[in-house]
Image: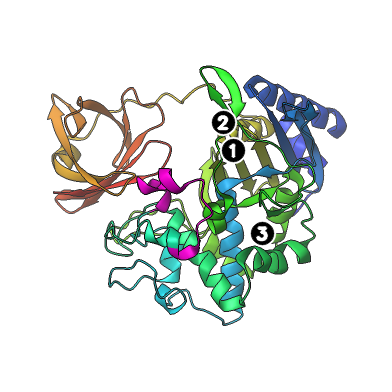
Amino acid sequence: MNRLSSAVLVAVALGAGSAAAQRQELSARVDSIVTAALRIGGMSVAVVWGRDTVTMKGYGLADVENDIPATAQTMFRVGSVTKQFTAAAVMQLVEHGRLSLDDDITTFVPNAPVHGRRILVRQLLNHTSGIPSYTDVPEFDRVARLDLSHDSLLATIAPDSLLFEPGSHFYYNNTGYYLLGMTIEKIVGQPCAEAIATQLFTPLGLAGTAYCSPSAIIKHRAQGYGVRRGQPVNAEYTSIDLAFAAGALCSTAGDLVKWTNALSSGRVVSGASYTRMTTPVELPSGRKMTYGFGLEAGQLDSHRMISHGGAINGFSAHLAYFPGDSLTVVVLANSSAPTAAIALNIARAAFGLPLQVGPALPKQMATPPALRAKLVGAYLLMQPDGSWVSATITQQDDMLQLQIEKGPPRPLLYQGEATFAIAGMGPARVYFDVAGAIATGFQLDAGSRPLEAVRH
């Protein structure tokens, strides 16, 4: 789509009337959506349609103890939204011939915990390496407040074997992006924070984006909050050095809009590289995931969406870009507010779609008997900590059921195309890999990290 006047786009989406009036109406709906979700702390929200800023403002407090309001200039920790910056920096190095997506990671990080396997740069970018995530191992709780060296951080997962053969499954993985940050340092010869600033922040004029060091003086920095016994508290401290290239950045809503515009228009990486970043990885089973390199690709109704969320102690963030509509929505919070749900409802309001209140109710379709026969059986399901537990698909009358370990059997509600909802588990979905006469495995997506299962 050409970048038509954003005022025209707003008018088309929301109906007749002056563009200014329609913009004001959408801005009022954004206010309503955000204030209804705000419980503690504050938020900063940007909604930009083409060249038209519908809204860019703060809500609530950036610092509760000192009554400092959140504004459009407030800098929030953005957690895993950081990953797209790391991925873009890696793709720039690929374009300059300084590494290849098919390079073995041990070329740059000799002590990477690969356990004798060949793990590629691309497998770190798209979470198919099989390396355990350091944030999932029990040791992480003990060291989360410590500013560990790279070697000490990698030592927390070094004893653990790979979760699966590299490239065979998907496992959202902070270790992969930590290793990519180490790779950038090795190639560029300077700390990752400085390299990212030199390659990305400075040339793009992202003055409100930085490595969120606790010792640095960062203007307009928000404080993070949690809840204990129903009351707001200061968030537990976690070393930002451990977040590193997987989640260490602070940014503003406006800078993330500026970044999205630059990245999608070819001013950061080439069009071919951006296509790679936004093309979901396809597993050997033939199932396509939603993740590319540092970005997820999906749909909201009929609207293509490129997005990523982030969460780190005391903060949550979500950035959603709709390329066919030239719409960017950013929601940043200094709490565990549901920023993804807020951002998607803002987009629904912009597109004239009904808002979603609570989880969407799944369909209840009859499961074809031939499909039921292919899915029944015993599986092994990977847990967030990398361990494997038993999972069984059984048939009760005309309905399939999922039982994990010794838990209760849960009815599966057929949604079409070998996809099932889990009764009583809201947005959770089970996606089966069907090859020939039987399913070879499935993916369980319960809203945090997709978990892979293989037939046992």
What is the number of the mark on residue 316? 1
Q: Position of residue 298 (x, y in %)?
A: 51, 47
* Nearer-N-terminus badge (3/2): 3
| Cα–Cα span, label 1 and label 3 | 23 Å
Q: Relative to residue 203, is residue 149 drawn left or right?
A: left
What amino acid is at disc 2?
Pro
Q: Give the residue displayed 35% in from the left and 36% down from the top.
A: 429
Q: Mark 1 and 3 residues: CB-CB less than 8 Å, in contact?
A: no
Q: Give the residue displayed 29% in from the left and 49% down from the top.
A: 386
Compared with residue 14, is residue 4 higher up or lower down, i.e. above or below? below
Q: Quadrant of residue 334?
A: top right
Q: Which residue is mark 2?
A: 338
Q: SS for tag 3?
A: helix
Q: Position of residue 27 (x, y in %)?
A: 77, 29
Q: Position of residue 246 (x, y in %)?
A: 53, 55
Nearer mark to the viewer, of 3 and 2: 2
The stretch of residues the image draws in magenta is: 133-151
Res. 373 visible in picture: yes
What amino acid is at disc 1?
Ser
Q: Which residue is mark 3?
A: 264
Q: Give the residue displayed 70% in from the left and 48% down from the top.
A: 251
